[in-house]
Image: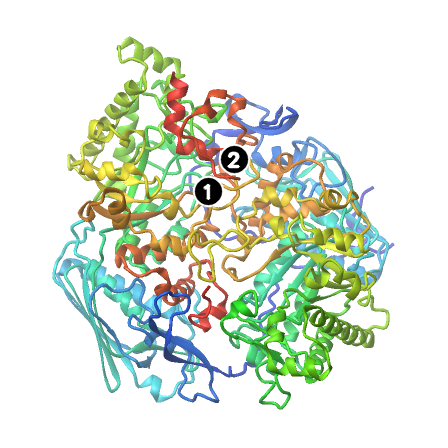
Amino acid sequence: MKWGNNSCSAVWVFLLFVSYHATCIASYTSPWGWECRTEPVDGNPDPTQVDRCIKVEKSISPSATGLNTCILTCGPHGAIWPRPTGPTHIGPYTAYFLPQNIGQVTTTCPGSIRHYLDMTIEVFVDNINKYHPDYVDGSAPWDGPYGPEVTDQSLEIHIIVTEESMTLDYNTDESYDLNVVHDGSITSATITAPTFFGARHGLESLSQLIDYDEEKDSLQVVHSAQISDSPVFPHRGIIVDTARNFMDVKSIERTIDAMAASKLNIFHWHITDSHTFPLNLENLPDMVEWGTYSSRHIYQPADILHLKEYALVRGIYILPEFDAPAHVGNGFQWTEEAGLGKVVVCLNKEPWMQFCVEPPCGQFNLANSNIYTVLSSIYDGMVPLFQPLSSFHYGGDEVNLNCWNTTQEIIDWMTANDYGLSSDSYYEQWSIFQENARLELTEANGDVEVPGIIWTSSLTESGHADQYLDPEKYIIQIWTTGDDPIIGELLEDGFNVIFSNFDAWYLDCGYGAWVGGPGNNWCSPYKGWQTVYENNPIQLASDITGADYSSQILGGEAALWSEQVDSLNADAKLWPRASALAERLWTNPSESWRMAETRMIHQRQRLVARGIAAERLQPEWCHQNEGLCYA
Amino acid sequence: MRGNFILLLFMGALVPSVYCQDSDYPWAWDCRNEVVEANENATLEDRCVRVMKSENINATGINTCKLTCGPNGVLWPRPTSVELGKDVNFFIPDNIRIYTGVCPANVRILLDVAYQIFSDNIAHYTPDSITWNTTYTHEVNIAVQVTDNQEHLNYDTDESYTLRIISTEDDTAVTIHAETFFGARHGLETLSQLIDYDDEHETLQIVSDVVITDYPVFKHRGISLDTSRNYIGIPSIERTIDGMASNKLNILHWHITDSHSFPLEVKSRPKMMQYGAYSPSQVYRESEVAELIKYAQVRGVHILPEFDAPAHVGNGFQWGEEDGLGKLTVCVEQEPWQSVCVEPPCGQLNLANENMYDVLSDIYKDMVDMFQPMHVFHYGGDEVNLACWNETEEIIEWMEGKNSSRDADDYYREWSNFQERARELLVNASKEVDAESSVGEFGILWTSHLTEEDNVKKYLNPDEYIIQIWTDNKSNIIKEVLEAGFRVIFSNYDAWYLDCGFGAWVGAGPPNINWCSPYKGWQTVYDNSPHHIAKDLTGETHEDKIFGGEVAMWTEQTDEMALDSRLWPRSAAFGERMWSNPSESWRLAETRMVHQRKRLVQRGIHADRLQPEWCHQNEGLCYAYPAEDINPELTTSPSVTTDGGSNLATMFVLNVVAIMFIALN
């Protein structure tokens, strides 16, 4: 059966994108308003009184304001997240203003950083425009009509920075002072900070003294505030994995935006793994050609340079990781044809359970000295993209000795060199590899040594860490449980550490199994924001050791391993839970999450306003009825 | 014979992608018959295996392989009967013609919209803006034929269709025959899944020869969506309907209101929305609902409205006293909430206030008008808290005034009286609009105290109600209602509640997770079989009484931001259970499932990732099976700890060192 053109009348239908939202329907005025009142905290064993925004009928309480006005000004910390650590005063009133009425902006700073301050001010202006519910692509319709109570008001910003360093490392002073005063028609905000990074945080706090006003369709700013603030921990990070699944540049930018909104400062980038090698190294193009999922899943050098700058302007260092000697595989298939022999062994080997912790397997071939040729090329390619390096992550986790010990080439090499085939023999060779890797990286970095970070592993276990690793050269990132005695041993051995204990700070947990099933993934259950918030590294260390090791605890990272994450769902898995981490690391609060709940909910709303698809923690009713979602 | 040709124009996405050359890409795929790992029966199955292009001349692009490999290709849900050719033809969209054959005129209009949806769907397969190579002249001619003039889906709708594809070198002829429009649109959906983009030729491709006969096992295949705890915007509901259409789901059960908010515009009672919506921008206007119903209809989806009562009401009713109607609801936002409801805020209708029925009647009338034609209605009816009523002075006095005692049974009686009056109001309102309305036979109620033990027989008539089961799969209530003769819909929370497994939202202590944790993985969703559950509890499958099921998306912790990833692709797993009711486990569906997730993403749905993309490119290698099957010593590791339900990777990750020592020794 065939149908010819000439047998029927032809109707041409053009494909239209149908929108049902073109028509604007007349709105009504909500009967509700909010009032800041001091009330007991329900569900809190100690009957503290706190300030809460209470929903009331406007007709009964004429002084009630919009919800945002109330939230900005209610309570000792308003809607600032993370909570400032120094003396803080938030006034009870706001002044309206429009973004176009940002008046004088002055920057007093060394000339070399003025450019960065200008860019971070642009980010600030964009952020406050984003509070408008109809913000799209860089602009918001501030259409009014506005009365003089809005149009006569302006905001001035003065920034004073003394140091010229644009390097973020463990010695960077991120503190700032923010002073907001109001004089009739001008709200004036002054930020004083030793470094660019502190000033940026000050602008972030200022943006959190600002919000949209629903009734006036305007912005409003708390017009009297003093904040003195600095972080407790210098390393406040998120680790994102782009090897199990690819995350596009846009979603990495969004992640950085959200980090900036919570004053996180380290974007630890687990770029590669056994699954893929998505990084295009111009000096070693074979890696990406063999290693990427497809031509649409590649980070070009220009992408990296762009992201590095994007992050820096937002007060964030991109910490690159090249995980080795395990967690390598796809990408290295070209080496035999190229005459370098097998650089990776056990690649995609089955059954995977015998040779690695998840499919696909792969580890460097210790018996092949060409691994160092390839490794040094990888480092040579990476360093210019990420420099200046403040630190580097060597990975170093989950080496499977059985992989090496079932590979004939390695067995022969171990035997021929009289190294033996015991576990200790392999640990010894692994540690030699690690030292060689460190030397190669240092060479690639122009012989400038930088702190190296490695994951806890068999090499950091009891009796191994002090034998194989130098606490002067390595920081250990802890991913075991928070009560693991290893933590105590590492601290007692003098290592500086970063916490990512999986029982609180692994954000990929709690979903369905991805190998086998039914049932859920290995680190289930899901870590609720309360669990994330209450995970206190100093407390964990002291519970294990009975001593105070706070000087060796640099901070922590929430981890988003991406077996079940990609550009589409990363926002919801990271946020707002990583904001809970941020308050732990910036403020290290002594109170429980209960005291932070209403600010946390509002921070989630702020993230959404800024374009982050953060997860909902509660019904909106709880946002509108502060303190009533207790149990 | 009259017919229409529809020429389809395609709009590619406009994102340029100029990374490395595709010609450098070293991989290709080959369909091979291999052992299914971890399957106790050691079944052989067709799998797309990744190979080096340079060493395998016959290997193809990944999509070509997936379209033609295995008995079901990448069709989801699996058709009732299918024969798939092993070849594809490459073509460009300009060369598609769609032709409507014999067909009632009213259905022709619906089909024209369905063709646009079809063309839009396949347009989304092309990854980037593309210039089609017009030297590909292969024609694809699609003929659709429908006999019945039914426009609205109900429980009698025949959703079956047949689809045939035959091809020559020059052209492909596709015929879709269906009794109703709904069958035809399912046929078009299936056709869209026999087509995909090809990276190598930069064309579309279609499977060369196909014979499919297909119809659903269950007639009620739904998603329950709550828009009260958090507001869900219309575009997100549309996306949900798109996802449903992609999986041949047919009922969007809309839990519009609850005690938290009342976002629905009720024209006769505008204060409901004004007092009840979270904000003036978070509302559903009558006109928007009308458009949404049409949007769903052409995608084969019926919107089933719920007005939950007499509990789960509250916000929206606060104007009653000011307007002289007295308290319409009681216990609203009463504290401490734990004593009068299951979650904050509380609220129940005030049984003692006759004015309440006037307002209820107005709400029903407006809903009946909005949701025409209404063949089924959901009364809610869950989680009534007797203490609320029994602690409210007005209700106590009312009970005493009737010389009624105030035992639980007295309140059940009053609740059932309320339910009967509510039913009469709704059915009467419905009959006024449509005398033929079947809504009197198809009222739906959630399982509750009223459906327990003796209550269900005493208070509810099986000819009037369908019971939606939300207990776990072991509950005696399931047995009770089936044996009492009720028709049922399954939504047992231990498999089909998609909101489970996240953090606690009413403060709690560790482990800070919500009440119905753990999370229900897609495998759990897939394996949940209503017939098996019924048989385990009663000894019979009760196929005639089990209308189907719904996955439930309660939205305490979901709004537009994460809605897609909660619903999808798990609701696709549910879709195959409902349509195909497979006797095999999820394992045999895994590769198709992972591809269906990808398809949903292409269609603009932010579906959750189930696995590394490596698993999509390396079919069948993301398995796990008990360690003893590969190496018995591994499980003797002294420090192995497994937490219940977790997969085996736990022990490997946690105890890799211990395992390695043993392996070495």
Subunit of mark 1?
Answer: A
From the viewer's perspective, is B461 left or right of B33? right
B25 in relation to A512, above or below:
above
Residue B604 appearing in the image: no
Q: Residue at x 30, y 32 (%)?
A: A378
Pointer 2 with pointer 1, Cβ within 8 A: no
Left or right placement of residue A453 versus residue B175 in this view: left
Taking depth in this image into account, of B253 and A198 the one nearest to the observer is B253
The three-letter code of the residue at mark 2 reads: Val
Quadrant showing the N terminus of chain A: top right
The residue drawn where x is 50% and y is 29% is B27
Q: Secondary structure at mark 1?
A: loop
Q: Residue furthest right?
A: B1
Residue B455 visible? The answer is yes
- The one nearer the camera, B69 or A260, is A260
Q: Position of residue A106 (x, y in %)?
A: 19, 71
Disc sitting over residue A296 in the figure: 1
Q: Chain of mark 2?
A: A
Q: Check disc 1: other Cα within 10 Å, few if <14, some if 14-19, many if 20+.
A: some
Q: Which mark is residue A515?
A: 2
